[in-house]
């Protein structure tokens, strides 16, 4: 063999040696790859964490046992489904949007808590992590899903959110109640109390009502207007004689429950209409203590407005709060009236007399405003009691008190001074006018027929008039002058009016 031939044969052997080494290396790499895939498969299949491969068309390609158990499907069942088949419709759009970003490689992975549905339609919260991975040559990439059941965690978080929301609402409700309670406690005078409370309630956003409404107090068989806000005179006139069971307010007062009307024009029970009335919704809240209903509060809303359970509950609490405030104010007024009025005749007693005398004296000294007093005494009243009895005498005192009250103005004050004596305080009244009042009362009583048992009777009165002139230093002096004039009327034969005249100096 020539040298050239030997060289050519050596090159062939060398080439075969290189090819053999390269083949051996590729074979080794394939074995490593198979080993890696086998390890991944074992990890994938045996992992307690749910894993799945999903195509770009969202069809399940493969899933491990943990994933199948999570959704209660077999692998065969699962591979006939898509990811969208197990996704709650509420989360479907979100999932589609993130899958699109993953497919376009705009984001490396996607992690979120999603609502899925098990095979039995039971809801399931899944902590889902998704990424895009390549596949074997010729196959499209797919989504790799890692899941865990986070239902309990999500439920606990939601419970905490709800509890926090309830707590915040409770704090807000307490703030509202405290604000209304503060408004209601500023005064014990019932009308002022209700007006202040009504203004405060309609200002609060939580109730979502108009700055319009009112409060009516239950008195026997009537609902009496007590406080109103931004309502026309035509409304007040239409509700002036509202019965305790009339219209929607009457229903709330009778049932003790909150009454809601979504449209005043469409609700047949909303029977009271007035000129200029606009369509509106009504919520009527009974003012109810533990013992009784004292009235109702009505508030106006936009027609069709929704009154949810929370606001109804809050208004019920406000109704009880106002009811107790009204009851306390009524008890105070009753106690105040008793402390300032005679229990038999209902006229003022000496306590109120002293207050009114001091007030009128102050006006007289400050502005020179005149005022006068009239002292009245029943003639021969002891003899009347001896003949007719003391119970009959008490009825006479009541009749005389009513007659006197009917003959004086609202600004005047009738006082039971003691026994059968009465005192009248007449603000802004001079001596001449006071004498005219006294004469009118004298004639009225003299002509009055007392229907006393066992037979009708008549009685007369003697009256003494005194006015507050410059010589009167105090109330004691003024009353002494009226008393002196009274006794002069007695001395002159009774059934007379006498006035105090200062005798000229000797």
Image (spheres, grey):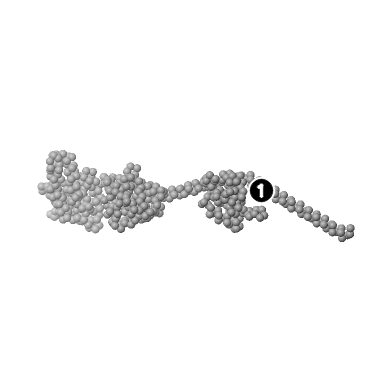
Q: Nearer the viewer, residue 243 or 487?
A: 243
Camera sees residue 481: no
Packing grade of label 1 (10 A; few <14, some 14-19, many >=20) is few
Residue 108 appears left or right of 285: right
Camera sees residue 45: yes
Vertical arrangement, residue 254 with respect to residue 199, above or below: above
Q: Quadrant of the N terminus?
A: bottom right
Residue 267 picture location, percent across and down: 33, 52
Residue 235 picture location, percent across and down: 29, 55
Residue 21 appears left or right of 403: right
Question: SS of the residue at dot 1?
Answer: helix
Identify the residue at image location x=41%, y=48%.
309
Identify the residue at image location x=88%, y=59%.
3
Q: Nearer the viewer, residue 342 or 432?
A: 342
Residue 309 appears left or right of 251: right
Residue 270 picture location, percent across and down: 32, 51
Identify the residue at image location x=35%, y=55%.
280
Identify the residue at image location x=58%, y=52%.
58
Q: Nearer the viewer, residue 59 or 151?
A: 59
- Which residue position holds label 1? 40
Q: Quadrant of the C terminus?
A: bottom left
Q: Nearer the viewer, residue 439 or 288?
A: 288
**Total residue callouts:** 1
Residue 388 picture location, percent across and down: 14, 39
Outermost residue toward the right in this view = 1
Residue 232 sits in which quadrant?
Answer: bottom left
């Amino acid at each position: 063999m020539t040298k050239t031939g030997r060289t050519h044969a050596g090159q062939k052997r060398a080439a075969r040696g290189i090819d053999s080494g390269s083949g051996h290396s590729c074979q080794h790499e394939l074995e490593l790859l198979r080993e890696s895939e086998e390890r991944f498969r074992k990890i994938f299949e045996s992992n307690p964490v749910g894993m799945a491969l999903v195509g770009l068309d969202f069809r399940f390609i493969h899933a491990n046992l943990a994933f199948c158990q999570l959704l209660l499907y077999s692998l065969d069942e699962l591979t006939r489904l898509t990811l969208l088949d197990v996704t709650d419709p509420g989360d479907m759009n979100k999932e589609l949007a993130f899958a699109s970003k993953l497919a376009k490689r705009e984001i490396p992975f996607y992690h979120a808590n999603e609502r899925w549905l098990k095979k039995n339609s039971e809801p399931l919260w899944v902590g889902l992590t998704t990424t895009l991975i390549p596949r074997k040559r010729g196959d499209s990439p797919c989504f790799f899903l890692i899941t865990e059941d986070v239902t309990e965690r999500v439920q606990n978080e939601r419970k905490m959110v709800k509890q926090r929301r309830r707590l915040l609402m409770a704090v807000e409700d307490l703030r509202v109640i405290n604000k209304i309670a503060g408004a209601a406690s500023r005064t014990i005078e019932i009308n002022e109390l209700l007006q202040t409370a009504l203004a405060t309630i309609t200002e609060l956003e939580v109730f979502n009502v108009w700055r319009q409404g009112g409060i009516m107090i239950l008195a026997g068989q009537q609902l009496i207007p007590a406080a109103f806000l931004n309502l026309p005179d035509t409304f007040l006139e239409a509700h002036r004689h509202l019965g305790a069971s009339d219209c929607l307010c009457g229903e709330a007062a009778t049932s003790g429950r909150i009454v809601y009307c979504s449209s005043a024009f469409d609700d047949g029970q909303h029977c009271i209409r007035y000129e200029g009335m606009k369509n509106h919704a009504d919520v009527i809240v009974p003012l109810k203590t533990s013992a009784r209903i004292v009235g109702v509060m009505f508030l106006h809303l936009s027609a069709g407005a929704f009154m949810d359970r929370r606001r109804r509950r809050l208004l019920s609490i406000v109704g009880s709060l106002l009811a107790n405030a009204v009851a306390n104010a009524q008890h105070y007024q009753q106690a105040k009236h008793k402390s300032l009025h005679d229990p038999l005749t209902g006229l003022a007693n000496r306590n109120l007399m002293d207050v009114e005398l001091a007030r009128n004296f102050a006006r007289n000294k400050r502005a020179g405003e005149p005022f006068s007093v009239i002292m009245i005494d029943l003639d021969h009243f002891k003899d009347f009691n001896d003949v007719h009895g003391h119970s009959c005498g008490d009825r006479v005192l009541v009749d005389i008190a009513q007659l006197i009250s009917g003959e004086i103005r609202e600004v005047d004050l009738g006082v039971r001074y003691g026994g059968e004596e009465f005192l009248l305080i007449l603000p802004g009244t001079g001596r001449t006018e006071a004498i005219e009042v006294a004469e009118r009362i004298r004639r009225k009583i003299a002509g009055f027929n007392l229907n006393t048992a066992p037979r009708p009777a008549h009685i007369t009165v003697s009256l003494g008039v005194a006015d507050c002139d410059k010589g009167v230093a105090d109330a004691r002096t003024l009353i002494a002058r009226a008393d002196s004039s009274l006794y002069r009327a007695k001395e002159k034969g009774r059934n007379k009016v006498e006035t105090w005249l200062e005798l000229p100096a000797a």
